[in-house]
Amino acid sequence: MAVLGLGRDEGGGRVVVTVDGGRSAEGRLPWDRVDAAEHRVRRALSREAGLLLPEDDLAASAGEEEAGAELAALLGGPGLEAVRDALARWRGARDVAGRPAWLVVDARDPQWAGLPWELLEGAPAHAGPAAGCRVARWGAPRARGASGRVERVRVQSATPADPVCARAVRGAEAAARAAGLEVESSAAGGPVDVVHLVSHGIAALGEVGIRTEDGTARSSAGAAAAALHDGLAGARLVVLDVCGGADPGALRTPAAAVAALGVDVLAPARPLDADAAAVLHQGMYRSLAQGVPVPEAVAGGRRALRAHASAAPAGRWWLPVLLVGEDPDGLAVVPTSQGTPPAAPPRRPWVAGVLGLGVALVVGVLWAGGGAEPASTPVPAPAEPAPAPVALAQAAHPAPVEPPPEPVAQPTASPARPSAPRAAAPAAPGRLEVRPLRPVQVRVGGRGWQVASRVMPVVLELPAGAERLEVGEEGEVAFTCEVAVPEGGTVRACPDPVLAGCRCP
């Protein structure tokens, strides 16, 4: 697996790729290249309005292939040679081992996140080493999930009285049963492997919410997370059948809110029509019933949707977005970067991350000195220099020891003034590593805002003592955490915007 960290600072775009085992490579590119690539991608995906014909799928597929090639080429252009070479070596090793290449996108900038990275899977091989990769997006870190065959699915709706949602619930239940899975209709049935939530999606002011039973739109963090939290024990996947539930260009989505609870999430980037959703769910549940891991089952659902060849813009195969917090291979937790953490970007506030609405200000618990420290590459102590030949000769034939000189009497001096006490040596500074669960803005002690993410943390040297870590959005403080920076040591803070506190998994 490879994690693709995408950021932005005053110098332009920043790309960090971390491949198996924590080996990483970094590069930069001017931001106007990102703007130009985004324009070409949007143009390739544009469709003329009018009556849809079956053969329009060919034209749509050609545009999607062109857009995927643009994205693959963007990751291998000037300034990103190290990233391209690292991806090429990783892809080569994957191909030799016969294992699928999963690329997990961790975008910390809205423009980076808004690009349809899922189209890389359909890009031609000549476009670059990222072409053909199966794409997931970073959700939130979690422990390694359960393994084994998926057996039980629960399908529920936030608005069970709505006829459209009721029909979608019946379709999802039918797809799961046809695959041979056991279906539960309520949380009272006990733990399940997959939770499938059906609801209408409501988009407004950069946020996608879900419509609740009383007919009002609720914030994604307040509604989706609250609707599922009590029934997620043991679940390995949450399917959000919510229009735009994982819109990468939105600041807050139901998918991000649920992923922050520690589970993989599948949701559409844009509205997905009923026929396409049925095909996706049938292909996915069929794979899950055969014992295929969750990410590969989602890839199977995408392939089924691609074979369905719907010409409708709401029926395209790349619209389902998978958010993961674990290695899609199912072998290990997504690794953090090894070695010296990358330098923090210049202090410049911008909109970043996904912060839950209506959270109370609480004091988080930090992972402080004496506990586990961030992984780092140990620096060996310098070896003692080999003794010179002269020194060896002197050691073999030591010079005779001369008697100590006779003491010489010293003249009596007048009493000296008492000297001022010597100032104590300054305390060694400590290090604060801010590695949030989701991209957020942070500042320490009222200094300038910086953007931090899991892949690109902010690392600061601070005087030993107590400091105040502020976490916010658009320059506004959302909550604070008290930080105890040890003298000469390192403390890690992991702000969690959903829980409004600091914790480290």
Image (cartoon, grey):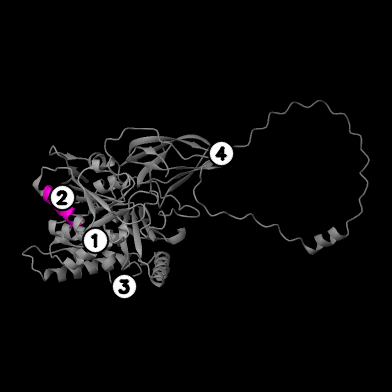
Number of the front mark, 2 or 4: 2
Q: Residue at x 31, y 60 (%)?
A: 291
Q: Residue at x 28, y 48 (%)?
A: 192
Furthest toward the bottom, the residue is 126
Q: Where does label 3 land, which residue?
A: 125
Residues at badges 1 and 2 in contact (C-beta under 8 Å)? no
Tell me the distance, in whole angstroms, between the alpha carbons under discs 4 and 1.
Answer: 56 Å
Start-end of magenta stretch: 165-175
Task: Give the percent coordinates (x, y) of residue 188.
Answer: 24, 40
Q: Is 451 drawn above or below residue 362 in the view shown?
A: below
Tell me the distance, in whole angstroms, between the alpha carbons under discs 2 and 4.
Answer: 57 Å
Residues at badges 3 and 2 in contact (C-beta under 8 Å)? no
Q: Where does label 2 land, which residue?
A: 169
Task: Give the percent coordinates (x, y) of residue 191.
Answer: 29, 45
Q: Main secondary structure of the magenta part?
A: helix
Tell me the distance, in whole angstroms, between the alpha carbons under discs 1 and 3.
Answer: 29 Å
Q: Which mark is residue 430?
A: none
Instruction: Assess disc 4: are there few (<14), some (14-19) or many (≥20) residues with their C-alpha within 10 Å of its C-alpha.
Output: some
